[in-house]
Image (spheres, grey):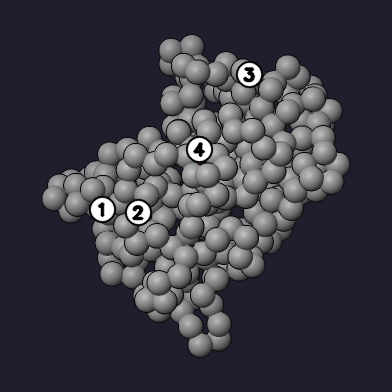
């Protein structure tokens, strides 16, 4: 199976390029062309530039679409251009090239304000929400906490339109929590553990490197037309419900945040 990955030079892109290489024939894309060691090269493809995408996806069976702007609370204009227009361009070019499936990197920020009301904390991982004992299902109403979250919701619905109404492409959106570095000592630990609220948040959202690769693999393989589902490891205090991820994708998480954080706490070298 021939699989393209956009945003391949980024954090998750590098993980997937390494983890899926043995199983799929990969073509890697990012903003800039780049030759890496051991024969790995990245081709330039700015997804916000429709013309620059022309012909780039020819011969691919699937695309993992990671390219997006998400760090540092991006502006509305930036997420419209890179995320919404970028995803529209990508789907249109994929459809033209007869790519069968798109696996889309969505985010918990589409629902992270689920527990929000004028009287409550703004985060779904707030203690107030955790104390309710509820979990959030992907089918619960959207609750974006940022323009970024809004942009990913819009991209999910673009996918829904092409998959369920136009029926010309399959689309799987993974609402990723926090794709953590394989080695806890590479995680920004002092930032994460600076308060019980922030630590609880990351513990609930944790998705291990191994589970990240396995989940994208399942999203490439599972037989379905359209799905939006959550993407975390099997964390002890879950906030985002994994039922669809397990039942419909066949996701079988191997890790959970307890061990990761225990290891990190016992050896916080590299914290920054
Ligand atoms: N890292 C996480 O824990 C996390 C959590 C939730 C969702 N996500 C989503 O997963 C995806 C990957 O996240 P990441 O952490 O690897 O991000 P990253 O910022 O490390 O990498 C994103 C890559 O996309 C590229 N890119 C940005 N705009 C582009 C454009 N217009 N055309 C082509 N390439 C472009 C960047 O150059 C970068 O290499 C993103 O869509 C992000 O929203 C990540």
Q: Name the residue located 65 percent from the left edge and 46 percent from the top edge.
A: 227
Q: On the image, numbered disc 1 is attached to which residue? A: 258
Residue 17 visible in rendering: yes
Mark 3 in CB contact with mark 2 (< 8 angstroms): no
Q: Nearer the viewer, mark 3 or mark 2?
A: 2
Mark 1 in CB contact with mark 2 (< 8 angstroms): yes
Task: Look at the numbered disc 4 and give the secondary structure of its residue.
Answer: loop
Q: On the image, numbered disc 4 is attached to which residue? A: 250
Q: On the image, numbered disc 2 is attached to which residue? A: 235
Q: Name the residue located 19 percent from the left edge and 52 percent from the top edge.
A: 262
Of labels 2 and 4, earlier in sequence is 2
Of labels 3 and 2, earlier in sequence is 3
- Around disc 4, counting alpha carbons within 10 Å, would you say few (fewer than 14), some (14 to 19), or many (20 or more)? some
Q: CA distance from mark 3 to mark 2?
A: 32 Å
- In this view, the residue in front, 263 or 139, is 139
Mark 3 in CB contact with mark 1 (< 8 angstroms): no
Q: CA distance from mark 2 to mark 4?
A: 17 Å
For the N terminus, the image quarter is top right
- Look at the numbered disc 2 and say if its residue's Cβ is closer than 8 Å to ligand 1: no
Residue 52 visible in rendering: no
- In this view, the residue in front, 204 or 146, is 204
Q: CA distance from mark 1 to mark 2?
A: 7 Å
Q: On the image, numbered disc 3 is attached to which residue? A: 2
Task: Look at the numbered disc 3 and give the secondary structure of its residue.
Answer: strand
């Amino acid at each position: 199976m021939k699989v393209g990955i956009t945003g391949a030079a980024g954090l998750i892109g590098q993980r997937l390029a390494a983890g899926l290489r043995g199983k799929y024939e990969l073509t890697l894309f990012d903003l800039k062309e780049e030759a890496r060691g051991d024969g790995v090269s990245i081709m330039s493809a700015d997804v916000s530039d429709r013309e620059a995408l022309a012909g780039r996806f020819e011969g691919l069976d699937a695309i993992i679409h990671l390219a997006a702007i998400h760090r540092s609370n991006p502006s509305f204009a930036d997420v419209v251009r890179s995320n919404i227009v970028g995803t529209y361009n990508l789907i249109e070019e994929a459809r033209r090239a007869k790519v069968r499936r798109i696996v889309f990197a969505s985010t918990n920020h589409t629902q992270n304000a689920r527990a929000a009301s004028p009287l409550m904390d703004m985060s779904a991982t707030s203690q107030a929400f955790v104390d309710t004992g509820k979990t959030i299902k992907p089918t619960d109403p959207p609750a974006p906490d940022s323009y970024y979250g809004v942009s990913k919701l819009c991209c999910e619905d673009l996918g829904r339109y092409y998959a369920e109404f136009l029926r010309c492409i399959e689309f799987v959106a993974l609402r990723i929590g926090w794709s953590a570095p394989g080695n806890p000592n590479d995680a920004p630990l002092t930032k994460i553990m600076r308060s019980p609220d922030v630590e609880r948040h990351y513990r609930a959202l944790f998705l291990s490197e191994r589970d990240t690769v396995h989940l994208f693999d399942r999203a490439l393989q599972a037989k379905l037309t359209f799905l939006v589902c959550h993407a975390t490891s099997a964390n002890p205090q879950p906030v985002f419900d994994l039922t669809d991820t397990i039942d419909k994708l066949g996701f079988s998480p191997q890790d959970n945040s307890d061990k990761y954080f225990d290891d990190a706490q016992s050896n916080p070298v590299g914290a920054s």
